[in-house]
Image (cartoon, rainbow, N blue to C red):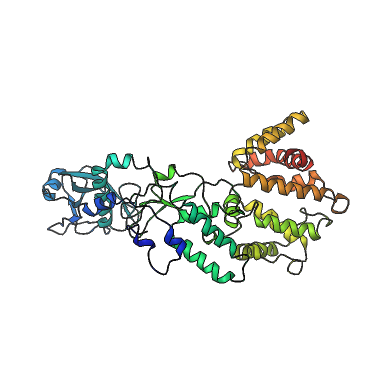
Amino acid sequence: MAASSNSSLSGSSISSDAEEYQPPVWKSYLYQLQQEAPRPRRIVSPREVENRPKHYGREFHGIISREQADELLCNMEGAYLIRESQRQSGCYTLALRFGHQTLNYRLFYDGKHFVGEKRFESIHDLVTDGLITLYIETKAAEYIAKMTKNPIYEQVGYTSLLKEKVTRRLSRTKNTSKKTQLSREANSSVEKITSLVRRAALSQNDNNFNYEKAHNFKVHTFRGPHWCEYCANFMWGLIAQGVRCSDCGLNVHKQCSKYVPSDCQPDLKRIKKVYSCDLTTLVKAHNTPRPMVVDMCIREIEGRGLKSEGLYRVSGFTEHIEDVKMAFDRDGDKADISCNAYPDINIIAGALKLYFRDLPIPVITYDSYSKFIEASKIVNPDERLEAVHEALMLLPPAHYETLRFLMIHLKKVTQNEKDNLMCAENLGIVFGPTLMRPPEENAFTSLNDMRYQKSIVQILIQHEDVLF
């Protein structure tokens, strides 16, 4: 992301939509402070120190006192050296001159150098980052404290004109003979503007299912100058300057990430697989109400397998089920699971069960698990049904919709019980541990809860029309 707000989106090659978009003026104050920060000045030892650790260079001075280190640094801002502790052999200290005083930090090495959370390839990088941080936090402490107060997040990319134009263009690609050409234009336009604009356009798409999803932030090292897309301030430091959402690409300060709304719009380019992907992330990325794996498998099963004896109980060949999984991961909704590719319907049923088992958060989430278990223990049928309904209300929308759709399907399976021999109780035995798992992986708890898991799925199937 460029520091200059106007130059980043200018040029004749950019579409008119992008040109009409007025990006925010990125706040350069912290960037200027980083440029002003003292530079590292390594103070080398005049003699070769015996037993110098291999991961330190000539800046290592051996066993010297704090006073000696202070004398060597000699009032030079940014000067640094490493000394060994006089009291504790094998412990090392980084002595750093900043703000007209010598600061001492306990230094560690585990393949990389660190004094806090950040880990560096070299001492020089560690000191450079430390000086930047010290300088900025000293000069702009009050500014940083107020940084999140007036965010640009709600304004960036929410220009209504741009939203409408980009949305119309994206939808036109489905209905025009110039599909490829327009798609390229739309992609070009969207790539030129920030990820926030992209999410704004997607959020206005009529086909987009409005499930709330929190951002999946992970600490990230940015190459080159980068600005926070929440507060518009520079992300200072050499490494780990902020966090990036691995699902949509939003870049923000770590402290700003606490204030970002749960409005993540995952980008398909960032979703590497279908199986083992968070359920809400997958449906938002594919712009569907439910995971397309569920829709496609159920459609195939209902089309040719409802009367299959032992449906969901009889296992298909494991290697063939893995093939289906790989096809979904590779081809998404273009995966071929037809009878020509997989004549045995148990393979498709097995692939559906595997999808549910592989979810990082089960369909019946960890947060709601105990409520469902407690509900299943209630003796009075009416009260039990009410408690199950209350537990269902705790599920995230995408999980609720997936469970609802699955229960409608399993109800159809039970309606063919004469042929497939699968009643609600049998399906409860199969799907109980598949749809719900205890938050803590405890073999005793899992074994003890199996009868309640079966009971819950049985209730959901039998009373699907009332509960959903």
Please tell me in which quadrant of the rendered image residue 424 appears. Answer: top right
Instruction: Answer with left or right where residue 151 lies relative to residue 312.
Output: left
Please tell me in which quadrant of the rendered image residue 13 appears. Answer: bottom left
Residue shown at 30%/47% (left/top)? 115
Please tell me in which quadrant of the rendered image residue 355 appears. Answer: bottom right
Rendered location of residue 242, percent (x, y): 38, 50
- Nearest the viewer among 382 and 287 is 287
Residue shown at 76%/50% (left/top)? 409
- Nearest the viewer among 318 and 235 is 235
Residue shown at 67%/36% (left/top)? 372
Rendered location of residue 37, percent (x, y): 22, 51
Residue shown at 26%/49% (left/top)? 90
Residue 309 in view, yes or no: yes
Instruction: Answer with left or right where residue 50 lies relative to residue 313.
Output: left
Rendered location of residue 187, percent (x, y): 50, 65
Instruction: Answer with left or right where residue 408 lies relative to residue 259.
Output: right
Q: Quadrant of the N terminus?
A: bottom left
Rendered location of residue 230, percent (x, y): 41, 48
- Nearest the viewer among 432 and 219 is 219
Instruction: Answer with left or right where residue 106 lies relative to residue 178.
Output: left
Q: Quadrant of the C terminus?
A: top right
Residue 363 in view, yes or no: no
Q: Measured along the vertical axis of the image, is residue 375 above or below residue 262?
A: above
